Image (cartoon, grey):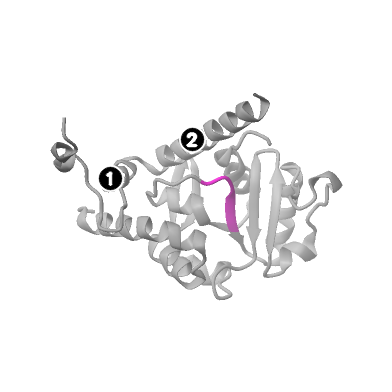
Amino acid sequence: MPAEELSGLTDYSPDGVDLTLIRWMLSLTPAERLQVAEQSVNDILAMREWNARS
Amino acid sequence: MPEVRYVATLRELNDGGVDFILVGGLAAVLNGAPVNTFDVDIVHSRDPRNVHRLLKVLEQLDAVFRIQPERRLRPNASHASCAGRLNLMTRYGPLDVLGTIGKDLGFSELIPHSLELEIRPGLRVRVLDLDTLIAIKEELNGDKDRAVLPILRRILEEKRKRPN
């Protein structure tokens, strides 16, 4: 599939912000946003630790 | 590095009766920003009674200055009463306790620019609003602030498009 065919399937602002990601976050409750952030940071820390060991 | 537990930190502060406003990256997340942040940033009331309550919670959280964690330097009332920044490590992860942010904006100046959000049943925290987050980041104009500004501005646009 040529890349042009994906043009209508993404939504970026002129300064490169992924608006689909923003809309997804805004669809969550504050509690869910916090959960996403907490989980992602712990996943990042776990990956860092794993890589430091190997 | 302990497991990062934002909610547990905020719950301890809340249960300890500490008057504070959540600012920084986590405030951006709660306002809808899809960004990662590793620490909890708060601006606290520097009223002596609140400083006392804060120190009690910091003790429960086993908070020490991050600069030389091996020395286990603990914050005291004098540290928590000034306008500066306490970069601490707690048993729930990094916590930055700020006397002021931006151009000397303390707790009482920021209260009108904050909103209360429920982050767990019965747990409500005061969070800096999006307009003020943007204004402060524009004012600071550091690399880190400039990086997140386009995201915050787009959230503001998206929110304005949405019905209340």
Q: In this figure, which residue is indicated by the disc labeled 2?
A: A40
Quarter of the image for the C terminus of chain B: give it.
Answer: bottom left
Q: Chain of mark 2?
A: A
Is label 2 in a helix, a strand or a loop? helix
Instruction: Give yes or no for contact between labels 2 and 1 (Cβ–Cβ under 8 Å).
Output: no
Give the camera-side residue of B16 and B101: B101
Asked if residue B164 lies left or right of residue A29, the reply is left
Q: Classify mark 1: residues with Cα within 10 Å, few (<14), some (14-19) or many (20+).
A: some
Q: Is residue B29 above or below residue B152?
A: above
> Which residue appears farthest toward the front when viewing the image?
A2
Residue appearing at x 71%, y 60% in the figure: B51
Q: Which residues are magenta?
A: B37-42
Q: Is residue B53 above or below residue B118?
A: below
Asked if residue A8 lies left or right of residue B82, the reply is left
Residue appearing at x 44%, y 58% in the figure: B147
Q: Classify mark 2: residues with Cα within 10 Å, few (<14), some (14-19) or many (20+).
A: some
Is label 1 in a helix, a strand or a loop? helix
